[in-house]
Image (cartoon, rainbow, N blue to C red):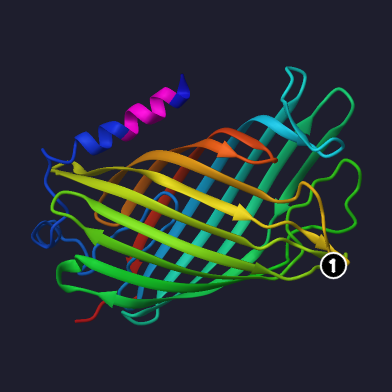
Amino acid sequence: MKKKMILLLFSLLLVLVRPSIGQNSEILQDTGFAKRPVFISVLNLQPLTLSKNRILFSLQAEFPEYYKYLNSKNGKTEQVSETMVLNEAYYYGRAVYGLTDRINLFTIIQLASIHHFSPTTTITDKGFGDFAIGGNYRLLESKNFENNLTSSITVGFPTGKYKNIRANDNPLGLGAYKFKGDVAGLHRFKNLDMIYSIYFEYRTGNSQGLNVGDEAGASITFQKQFNSNYGNFGLEGGAYGFWNLKDKKAGSSIPYTDDYNANLFVGAWFNYLKDFYLRFGVPYTIYQNKSWLTKYTALIQLDYYFDLKTNK
């Protein structure tokens, strides 16, 4: 039922392309928006850089629900039984600063809360995950923001707990340094905006002798904004996926550690008082290989923009 609802909402987004006002530069000026408009997804895709001295604070909560899991003993995916509880919540804090109109700097903090229960064992943990910093560089910005392209580099640090894990604990980090490069772009059609991205993340070995598998992924998002006297609303929908390579130890691949999946998602946002955004999204996994199989995920995100100083 939930899968049909996701597909229905995704189709509705495409149908609604025709009757609405687009996010054009005249409307942006009339409503008092910053010179560089906001194009960001609930997936945290940002194909435009912030203006100089402009700051974005973003808070996101993610609540996945699973219906299958990987049995590491036999390498098979098995149905989650009624006696098993898999509760997880992930919280992200993100700050972006416009160093110049072309260069942005950002930092990301993660907090996780995990509770897995079965009749034979209970695994729980709470705490900070891996910390990351990075920079975003504008490669292209056309007139009226019709086509835009940015590239970013992110460096992740192994600050989350990953060693000295007890039987009832769960790792909160990978224990490896991560180097991620990505490209995000924007193309504006007459009545619809398209955001796309591709990335690759290289992961080093950790102190336990494990070489964590690298990851690659891509996404595409379509957005539609509706302007009104009570605020601006928007709908978005799209698809994304990733591929995790196998972990290695002593030069040998570890079975059942690779993973790849494909997802659809729909979302909506409300823009209030120019610089405050509330976003909500529901991804749905349509295919996943040999790992936790996601039934659905709820994403809730708050974005707040402000200027560090005002140029007079």
* Residue 267 relative to residue 112: left or right: left
Q: Name which residue lies at 19% across and 65% down.
A: 146
Near-viewer residue (31 or 292): 292
Q: Quadrant of residue 99?
A: bottom left
Q: Name which residue lies at 15% across and 49% down.
A: 191
Q: Name which residue lies at 26% across and 77% down.
A: 310
The answer to if 43 sits in the magenta stretch is: no
Q: Position of residue 235 (x, y in %)?
A: 29, 41
Q: Quadrant of residue 154?
A: bottom right
Q: Which stretch appears magenta?
A: 4-10
Q: Position of residue 308 (x, y in %)?
A: 36, 74
Q: Main secondary structure of the magenta part?
A: helix
Q: How many marks?
A: 1
Near-viewer residue (205 or 243): 243
Q: Quadrant of residue 157?
A: bottom right
Q: Which residue is mark 1?
A: 251
Near-viewer residue (25 or 209): 209
* Residue 246 relative to residue 189: left or right: right
Kind of residue at badge 1: Gly
